[in-house]
Image (cartoon, helix red, strand yellow):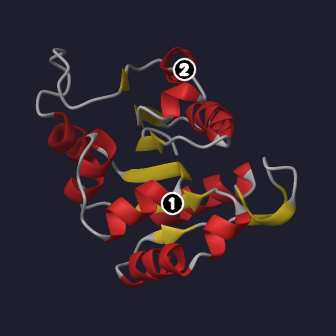
């Protein structure tokens, strides 16, 4: 991981708090991590958390005034060695599978030409919905790396498949995608 550039896309799911741990572990392993958050993602974990852990600015939208990434979606895409979307909601999976680019993260995902690792997390009924499964299947066909969600206790209080994979498994997937 030393000196590798990892873009972490954080979307609006309760599992977003685990992305803070992933950021910390990647930085400790020597990676440079740039976080791109959706508006919904900021409702679960603040950008300040990721700035403190990554020691880098967090990007929230396409229209900021900073100079580090002038045309953000292209500049961040050019900087990246790999992109990790964690947690990946049904929303971002659907956007990516269908070429929808209506925020910084979804636009960035269409602009990258590096490996993309998707770590889904959602309610079990959402995960098993045929539309979501079709979208995941399409991403697999296109070469995206999918870290299958785990089975167990969900935020809804029920048991089922849809919880975010273990942090170690997600980091292993990122490492594997870099090879």
Q: Quadrant of residue 94?
A: bottom left
Q: Position of residue 46 (x, y in %)?
A: 54, 20
The mark found on residue 90 in the picture is 1
Residue 4 visible in the current orientation: no
For the point 30% across and 50% down, which residue is it?
A: 106
> Is residue 12 left or right of 161 when viewed as pictured?
left
Judging from the image, what secondary structure is the residue with disc 1 in? helix
The CA span between labels 1 and 2 is 21 Å
Give the mark nearer the N terminus: 1 vs 2.
Answer: 2
Is 159 positioned to the left or the right of 97 in the image? right
Pick the residue in front: 103 or 28.
103
**Residue at mark 2:** 46
Contact check, label 1 and label 2, Cβ < 8 Å: no
- In the rendered image, residue 126, in percent from the top left (x then y), is placed at 62, 66
Viewed as shown, does residue 84 lie left or right of 16? left
Query: Measuring 53% from the left and 79% from the top, which residue is drawn there?
Result: 133
User: In percent of the image, x 50 and y 34: which residue is there?
Assistant: 41
Seen from this angle, which residue lies furthest left?
71
- The residue that appears at 59% across and 75% down in the rendered structure is 129
Between 139 and 159, the residue placed more toward the observer is 159
């Amino acid at each position: 991981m030393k000196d590798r550039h990892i873009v972490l896309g954080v979307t609006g799911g309760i599992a977003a708090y685990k992305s803070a741990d992933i950021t910390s572990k990647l930085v400790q392993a020597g990676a440079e991590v740039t976080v791109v958050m959706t508006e919904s993602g900021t409702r679960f974990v603040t950008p300040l958390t990721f700035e403190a852990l990554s020691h880098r600015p967090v990007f929230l939208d396409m229209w900021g005034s900073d100079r580090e990434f002038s045309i953000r979606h292209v500049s961040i895409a050019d900087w990246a060695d790999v992109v990790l979307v964690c947690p990946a909601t049904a929303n971002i999976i659907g956007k990516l599978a269908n070429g929808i680019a209506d925020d910084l993260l979804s636009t960035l995902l269409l602009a990258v030409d590096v490996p993309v690792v998707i770590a889904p997390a959602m309610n079990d009924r959402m995960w098993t919905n045929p539309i979501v499964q079709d979208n995941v299947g399409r991403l697999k066909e296109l070469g995206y790396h999918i870290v299958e969600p785990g089975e167990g206790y969900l935020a809804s209080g029920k048991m089922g498949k849809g919880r975010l994979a273990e942090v170690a498994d997600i980091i292993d997937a990122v490492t594997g995608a870099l090879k």
